[in-house]
Image: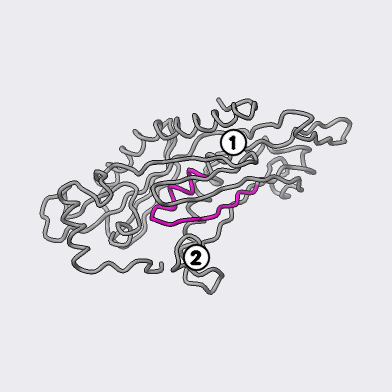
Amino acid sequence: MPRKLEVNVNNKEFIINALKDNKRLDGRSLLEARRLELEYGEGLGSVTVKLGESKVMCSVSCTVTSPLPERPYEGQMSISSELSAMAMAHYESGLRGNTAEEEATLNRQLDKAIRRSGMVDREALCIVGGEKVWSIALTLHYMADDGNLVDAGVTACTAALLHFRKPEATVVGGEVTYHPLDERTPVPLAINHTPISFTFAFLDTQDTQDTQGGGDIAVLDPNAIEAQLSDACFMVTTTPQKELLTLNKQGGKVLSVERVLECVGYATERAHTLAKQIHDSVNADLDRRRIGGIV
């Protein structure tokens, strides 16, 4: 992973000492996330998410394709993204750039949380069994990186898929007719659940003997400096129904079972609030367009 920021010793000590007093540089408490904002573009399925100063745009598109031979009644889904100097000047694009590993890690996390978790019912994407299915493509653009691109990316993908509508297709006698959006109301995707991601960064407090049990401090939604100083990051993806979708840890620090359970418990309790914010914002924009909202 590239070293994006260089933090000198004095700044590091100041940040750690502030965290010991339950304070962060941006005024948040340890388990307080930054403000989440969602903006919708002109097209259906186009969403820009701002998490503090981090900014991610996601757009969804669909095409008709042939199903995979081993899954003739299932549609397809793909997620692609690229880090570039637009997000942070340190980033270099391309396979030989210094961001290839971090970019691959982000894509894996998004793929696990969205596609592999089964957020979208892929059987509902079937048009003609064994012949034609919908292929859903998500494209992410990281516009600014101030830490925690995973949570911002998962939120952007989730909101974009809830917001997206595909053309209605009718099958008569083996012939498929695709109705333009101005002819028939577009159809929402069949959604199984709403993935919500939470990232915790663990920072070593060094001389602290009993802070949060074990000489380390956990902060929710780390910004870029906190992530750079952390010894490990732990990501939890869950649903408002408290179903765990993914657990992932990065970094060499060993986390105790108690710390893992604390993070999971906090995430499952908070997921409903964030899911409601996402659903409310999607419904508000769809109502503005006079298109039926989501449930």
Labels 2 and 1: the sequence-earlier one? 2
For the residue pair 116 and 33, the one nearer the viewer reads as: 33
Q: Distance between the residues labelled 2 and 1?
A: 28 Å
**Amino acid tagged 2:** Ala
SS at mark 2 in the image: loop
In the displayed structure, 268 sits above or below 99; it is above
Q: Residue at x 47, y 60 (%)?
A: 87
Callout 2–callout 1 Cβ contact below 8 Å: no
Is residue 1 one of those drawn in magenta? no
Q: Is residue 59 left or right of residue 144?
A: right
The part of the chain drawn in magenta is 137-156
| Residue where numbered disc 2 is placed | 85
Identify the image quadrant of residue 171.
Answer: top right
- Is label 1 in a helix, a strand or a loop? helix
Q: How crowded is mark 1: few (under 14 residues within 10 Å), some or many (20 or more)?
A: many
* Residue 232 image position (x, y, % from top left): 31, 58
Q: Residue at x 39, y 47 (%)?
A: 52
Q: Position of residue 224 (x, y in %)?
A: 35, 58
Report the label total: 2
Name the disc covering residue 163, or none.
Answer: 1
Kind of residue at badge 1: His
Q: Where is residue 233 in the image (x, y as percent from the top left)?
A: 34, 55
Q: Position of residue 268 (x, y in %)?
A: 36, 36
